[in-house]
Image: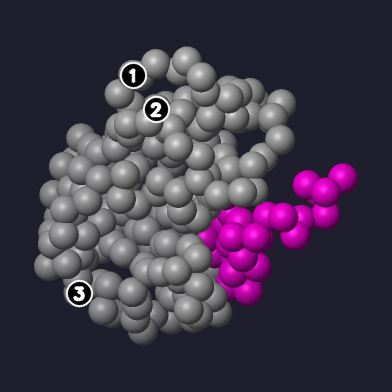
Amino acid sequence: MFNASTNNVSRRKLLGLLGMAPIAGGALAAVGATRPNFGGAIPIGSAGGTSTSSAGLTTSEKSRRRIQEQHLPNVPLITQDGKQVRFYDDLVKGKVVAMNFFFAKCEEVCPVVMANLAKVQKLLGDSVGRDIFMYSFTLKPEEDTVEVLKHHHHMFGAKPGWTYLTGNPQDLEKLRVAIGFSYPDPKIDADKTQHIGNVRYGNEPIMLWSACPGMAHAEFIAETLNWAIHPETSRVLKQ
């Protein structure tokens, strides 16, 4: 498929992979004061940032809503199969997810990360599409049409549970910034060739969000995502 090596990735871009901003920022600081609920999804009312009454909600429910409104915008998107979906309602709400950004004509970071994620999907097996959902969003929706995404989806051997997505450029840009795939320096941020190659993963119902380098060993990424699926196994959370 691809014979790209991490040795071919520039030092500047490798540093960029490790510089991904945390999702939720101050919202997660508030969440840290609450005990995660491992009992399943928490109803939070309407999605998409619509303001509704918070009367009667627990602190945990309010925190979850705040994260959704600020960092999980319910923008419309289109899958590689031409299906129209909403980011929060259809892709993230109540799910464990892994997300990254790429574009088809990227010649450095993207092919390495995407080939690596293909290995991750194979390692996770039937869990993908059942316990965890993988999403890859294009950074160049003007170029990466549904047909282009479908070709790349097939080229990397992506199976059900790993979805490629495009959409309106403004919506994808809003999403990119909201979930933390942006640089503080606007000049670097505007250069798509400098894009961040990390994988953002999270367990949305319990507000557990983090990231890992997309070029890390596939076994490490798979183990990390499996922990997001079963966070109750963490020795840290039990202390």
Q: Name the residue rendered at 31%, 64% in the picture.
A: 163
Residue beneath disc 2: 69
Front residue of 150 and 233: 233
For marks 1 and 2, give the one nearer the viewer. Answer: 1
Looking at the picture, which amino acid does disc 3 mark? His
Measured Cα–Cα span from mark 3 to mark 1: 39 Å
Q: Give the class, few, some or many, for how many residues have Cα within 10 Å of label 2's Cα (few <14, many ≥20).
A: some
Q: Earlier in the sequence, mark 1 or mark 2?
A: 1
Q: Residue furthest front?
A: 56
The stretch of residues the image draws in magenta is: 210-239
Taking the magenta stretch, the answer to whether it contains residue 203 is no
Residue beneath disc 3: 151
Q: Earlier in the sequence, mark 3 or mark 1?
A: 1
Looking at the picture, which amino acid does disc 1 mark? Ser
Q: Name the residue rendered at 45%, 49% in the picture.
A: 94
Q: Give the class, few, some or many, for how many residues have Cα within 10 Å of label 1's Cα (few <14, many ≥20).
A: few
Residue beneath disc 1: 51
- Helix, strand or loop under label 3: helix
Q: Give the class, few, some or many, for how many residues have Cα within 10 Å of label 3's Cα (few <14, many ≥20).
A: some
Q: Name the residue rendered at 19%, 71% in the picture.
A: 150
**Above-or-below relation of 233 to 85:** below
Q: Earlier in the sequence, mark 3 or mark 2?
A: 2
Q: Where does the image place residue 68, in percent across and percent down from the top left? A: 43, 33
